[in-house]
Image: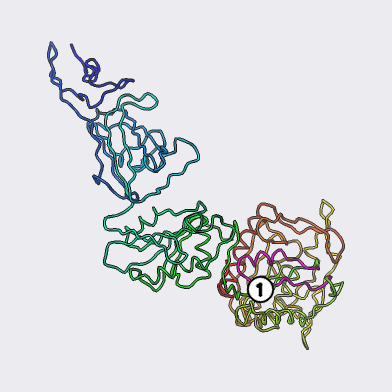
Amino acid sequence: MVASSQALLRHFGFCRWGPTPWVQLAGSLKLRTGNPVSWTTVRLVTTVTLEPAGRCRWDEPVRIIVRGLAPGQPVTLRASLRDEKGALFRAHARYCADAAGLLDLERAPALGGSFTGLEPMGLFWAMEPEKPLLRLVKRDVQTPFAVELEVLDNHEPRVGRLLGRVVHERDFLAPGVRREPVRAGRVRATLFLPPEPGPFPGIVDILGAGGGLLEYRASLLAGKGFAVMALAYYNYEDLPKGLENLHLEYFEEAVNYLLNHPQVKGPGVGLLGISKGGELCLSMASFLKGISAAVIINGSVAYVGGNLHYKGSGPFPGIIDIFGIGGGLLEYRASLLAGHGFATLALAYYDFDDLPKKFDMIHLEYFEEALCYMLQHSQIKGTRIGLLGISLGADICLSMASFLKNISATVSINGSGFSGHRVIHYKDSNIPPLGHDLRRVKVAFSGLLDIVDIRNDIIRGCENPCMIPIEKAQGPILFIVGQDDHNWRSELYAQIASERLQAHGKEKPQIISYPGTGHYIEPPYFPMCPASLHKLLDKPVMWGGEPRAHSKAQVDAWKEILTFFTKHLGPSPKL
C-alpha cells in the first residue's frame, strides 16, 4: 500500500483543512516505505512569534511569524482590540504557509480579507469598528492597547479551530517619558517630557474639532525626544463649550508657557495640528511670535466654523484691483484676495456714482490718488503696493507701474500693453491709442462677433509709440494670458512686452500661458464666460476658451497670483 503523508494525516485526524481544524495538534509525519506501511509521528505545535518580543510603542512596527504549520496550509489571521469604552475593532487576512510550514508576514502576501498584498502591519492599520461610525482613539495613554492576534485553520468564511493565539501590548509612553498636567492661567494641557537630561525642542500639538484633551500623539512624540504639549482648546474642564469664538491669546499663552519651561529648548517652538487644529496652527504661525516651524495635516487655509480673534491684526500688504471695460465697481476678486491676507482696494474708474459715465480718456492722476490713499492707510504694510488688472484694467495697471512710484509688483491678466482705444494721460505725457478697424470684425457661425483681429497692426514692434513704457516700472510684472483669448491676441502682446523690457536692459518677465483659455480669467470655480455684450461696441462678442481647460487655468492662475504677490509684497500676518 502506498499512502501520501497528507492522506495519512487526514485519516488519523492530525491535520484537517476542513471546517474542523486542529489546535496545536500533530503536524507532519515521517513515512518509511514498505509493505505494510509503517510511520512515526512528529508533534508540531503552532506558535505565534512577535519581533520585538513583549510590549512596544504603538508607532513602532512589529514582525509577526507563525511557525508549526503544514506546508502550504491555508490559515486566517485575526487581530482585535477594545478601546477604553469597550468598542471592538478588528481585522483579518487570509494567508498560506510556505513549503517549510512557516508564515512570515514580512514575506507572505495576504490573499484576501481586510486587505491584500504584502502588508506586514495590515492587521493593525486595517482594523474596523464592529459598530459603524466609530473612530479608534487612545483616551488614556498611561495604559496600553491589548491587541489579540489569532491564527485559525483554513480561510474565512470556512475557518476552523484556533491554532495559536497571542496578546500583544502596544503602549504610548516610552520608558522614562514624564507626563505633567498643565493648569497654568487659562491653559489646559498635558506636557510630555522625554527622559532627562534636557532641554528638548518643544512642540504644541492640537487636534481637531472633537474637543477635549487627547494625548496619544503628544506622548508618542515625546518618546522621540521632543517636549510636547497636548493642548485642549474647547469642551474640556472650564474651557468654552463651543467653537463660536476662539481667541489666539489663549494659544499665545500656551506657546509662552512652553517657551518659558526649563526643559524646553528655544528660541522657538514647533506646531502640529490636524483638521481644525491645523487651521489654528496656521493662525498661530501667522500672528504669534516664537514659532519656528509648523506641520499642518489636512487643515484649511481659511478660518471656518466660528470667529477667531486676536489683538493687533495687520498691517497687511496692499493691492489695487482694477477690472476691464464693463465699468462700475466689482468687488468679488478684492474680497477673495483679502481672505488671503491682502488689503485690497477694488477701484472703479467710470460709470459709478459721480465718476464719468463714459470711458473717453485715461487720466493717471485719478489712479495716483487711489495709490496715495492706500499708501497712507494705517492697515497697509510698507511703502509699496501691488497692482492686479484684467483686460483694460491690466493696461491701466501697466500704465500705473510705468509712470507712478511705489509699485512693488504688477499682475496683468490678458492685457495688451498698448493704449488701445483711448489716450492715456499723465501730467505732460500722452500715449496715443493704437486704434482699430471694424472692417476686420468676423462673424462666427453662431452669429457672435469675433473681434480678435480688429486692432491695427503693431508697426515697429516693441518700439511702437502706442505701447505703454513698461520699462519704467520699478517692480516685476507677471503676464497671465489665455491662448484662446478672442478679445485681442494677449499672448502676442505679452511676447512684445517681454521684448521691450529686454530691449531696455530689464529682466525677462514671467509669462504664464494657458491653452484653451479665453479672455475672462477669473478666480477659481467661476464658470467660463464664452460670450457677452461688449460695452463699447454694444454688440455680443465671443471671448474664447474651452470650459474644462479654462476652469483649470483659473485654479492655477489664482495660485500663481497669490504666490507672486506674497513673494514681492511680503508675507501677510493674516491667512
Amino acid of disc 1: Ile
Q: What residue span does the magenta drawing correspond to?
A: 327-351
Residue 332 among those drawn in magenta: yes
Left or right of 79: which side holds 129?
right
Q: Please determine whether, in this image, residue 161 is positioned above or below residue 341.
A: above
Q: Give residue 200's position: percent from left, percent from top.
A: 33, 67
Q: Give residue 493's position: percent from left, percent from top.
A: 70, 70
Label 1, on which residue?
A: 319
| Residue most extreme to the bottom | 428
Q: Please determine whether, in this image, residue 415 is positioned above or below residue 9.
A: below
Q: Please determine whether, in this image, residue 50 is positioned above or below residue 312.
A: above
Q: Estimate how packed mark 1 is, as few (under 14), some (14 to 19) or many (20 or more) residues with alpha carbons within 10 Å.
A: many
Q: Which of 383 and 212 is in front in this view?
A: 212
Which quadrant of the structure image shows residue 510? bottom right
Which quadrant of the structure image shows residue 205? bottom left
Rendered-image quadrant of the N terminus: top left
Q: Give residue 229's position: percent from left, percent from top.
A: 40, 61
Left or right of 17: which side holds 115?
right
Q: Nearer the viewer, residue 345 or 105?
A: 345
Which quadrant of the structure image shows residue 421? bottom right
Left or right of 44: which side holds 214?
right
Q: Which residue is drawn at 42% across and 47% down?
A: 137
Q: Give residue 414's position: percent from left, percent from top.
A: 70, 66
How many labels were placed on the picture?
A: 1
Residue 68 among those drawn in magenta: no
